[in-house]
Image (spheres, rainbow, N blue to C red):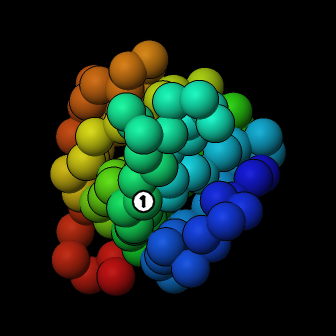
């Protein structure tokens, strides 16, 4: 997995979260040298909640919060927040199911 190299401090991962192979978590946007004035680099934190499962090959972009106990399907691109207890999949990611997680399992 690749965590944001310039800004790893902007990535928070909750307890019991699992992140699969070849995932990319990028807390900043990129721009070329020639477009920096028009499109300056921006940064925003990434927050991975407690018990989240991110399957292999996913990309998580800047400013995203993934709610606790959510599952991100293989190869998904997450560019918006995911509510807790969600099963998601796709490019861009979409919620395909909600988990019924009891409070006692925490």
- Say whether residue 80 is visible: yes
Most extreme residue toward the top is 91
Q: Position of residue 97 (x, y in %)?
A: 25, 31
Q: Which residue lies at the image location 37% right of the left edge and 26% below the top edge?
A: 93
Q: Is residue 91 above or below residue 62?
A: above
Q: Which residue lies at the image location 40% right of the left edge and 53% below the top edge?
A: 42
Q: Decide which of 26, 65 is in the foreground and name it.
A: 26
Q: Is residue 7 left or right of residue 102?
A: right
Looking at the rendering, which quadrant does residue 49 occupy?
bottom left
Residue under numbered circle 1: 43
Q: Is residue 80 above or below residue 103?
A: above
- Image quarter where the C terminus lies is bottom left
Q: Is residue 12 above or below residue 58?
A: below
- Say whether residue 16 is visible: no
Q: Position of residue 76 (x, y in %)?
A: 51, 27
Q: Position of residue 45 (x, y in %)?
A: 39, 66
């Amino acid at each position: 997995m690749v965590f944001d190299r310039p800004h790893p401090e902007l990535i928070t991962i909750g307890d019991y979260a699992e992140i699969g192979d070849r995932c990319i978590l990028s807390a900043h946007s990129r721009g070329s040298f020639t477009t920096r004035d028009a499109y300056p680099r921006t940064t925003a934190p990434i927050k991975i909640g407690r018990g989240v499962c991110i399957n292999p090959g996913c990309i998580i972009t800047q400013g995203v919060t993934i709610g606790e106990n959510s599952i991100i399907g293989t190869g998904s691109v997450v560019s918006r927040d995911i509510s807790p207890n969600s099963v998601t999949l796709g490019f861009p990611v979409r919620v395909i199911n909600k988990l019924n997680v009891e409070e006692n399992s925490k």
